[in-house]
Amino acid sequence: MATDSTPNETPVSETPLNKPSSGNGSTVKPPGKGFRHYAGLAGSYLLLTALSLIILFPIYMLILRALSSPLKYINAGQPLHPVSIQWDVFQRAFIDANLGKAMLLSFAVTMIIVVAQLVTATLAAYAFAFLEFPLKNLFFGLIVGTLLLPIEVTLIANVETIRKLGMLNSVQGLTLPFLATAVGIFLIRQGFLGIPSEIRDASNLDGYGHFRFMFKVALPMSKPIVGSFIVISFLGAWNQYVWPRFATDRQKWQTVQVALKTIGSENPERLNLGFAAAIVAALPLLILLIFFQRQIVRGLTAGAVKG
């Protein structure tokens, strides 16, 4: 009677294929996240939380002082909580300081400055990035050097020029000295320099001229930097105080920052109106930062990480 013989089979290793093994056949376990890792993570969150509280505390105090009755808040020892809340303070501040007209004027002036700076900065940055002309580096250095000059250096000369041109108390007088800025030229030029030369060569082969290349290729590829510059330009134009203070001498031409100085500064019972007006004037900036926060981060970190 024949007996069935079973061939010797080599046992299959039960070690999963995706787990590495050591030289002696034992499985190597990946290192786990120990106490030190979680302690470092918790410390990072605690540090970020502390920094956030430090940054947000002045904003909290601004809202607190705006909502509290001024005299009762002072008599209570200026605590860290509202005292005798006045919910209508924002409406009163908007009406008493005539913020509606001042904010409308500031918005018009700001938009003119932002658009003009964007156009002039883009054209100049393109010339410094892609064109070749004599003394290009010297001219660029002189333009960047103007960043070292504070507004007080040219204030008197600019005021006299505006006065001789008959532009006091006008939109032209409020905007003319700020139609171009070295900051925008520098930032957008750096963005243009990051465009690979192969793309420029390919555009030349496709018959792209300078303006077509700038609007179809250069600006779309530099969108984060352009977006961050728009925010910077808007913030600078909206928060102007020194120049509007000297370029106007009539109340109806006061911008929002000048109007804030005239409210709640004399009567102690109206001190909270000044805080409330400052919050109302800051709302457009808050909305702008919320919508453009991604462009700001991408623009300011452009070129920081390669790969």
Image (tube, helix red, strand yellow):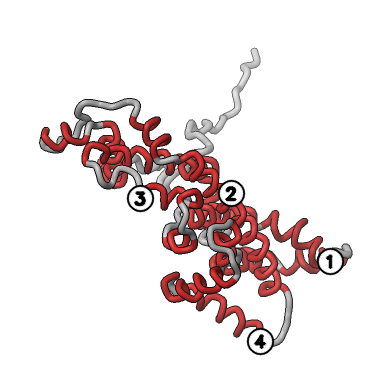
- Judging depth in this view, the residue of 243 and 131 nearest the camera is 243
Which residue is labeled 1 in the image?
209
Toward which corner of the image does residue 91 lie, by quadrant?
top left
**First in residue order: circle 3 vs circle 1:** 1
Determine the CA span between mark 4 and mark 3. Answer: 46 Å
Which residue is labeled 4 in the image?
135
At which x and y percent is residue 242?
42, 62
Outermost residue toward the bottom? 134
Indicate the amino acid at tag 4. Answer: Leu
Labels 3 & 2 near each other (Cβ < 8 A): no
Indicate the amino acid at tag 3. Answer: Lys
At which x and y percent is residue 104?
54, 43
In the structure shown, which secondary structural element does the residue marked by tag 2 occupy? helix
In this view, 132 is above or below 261 = below
The C terminus sits in image quarter: bottom right
In this view, 181 is above or below 138 = above
- Judging depth in this view, the residue of 241 and 9 nearest the camera is 241
At which x and y percent is residue 246?
45, 63
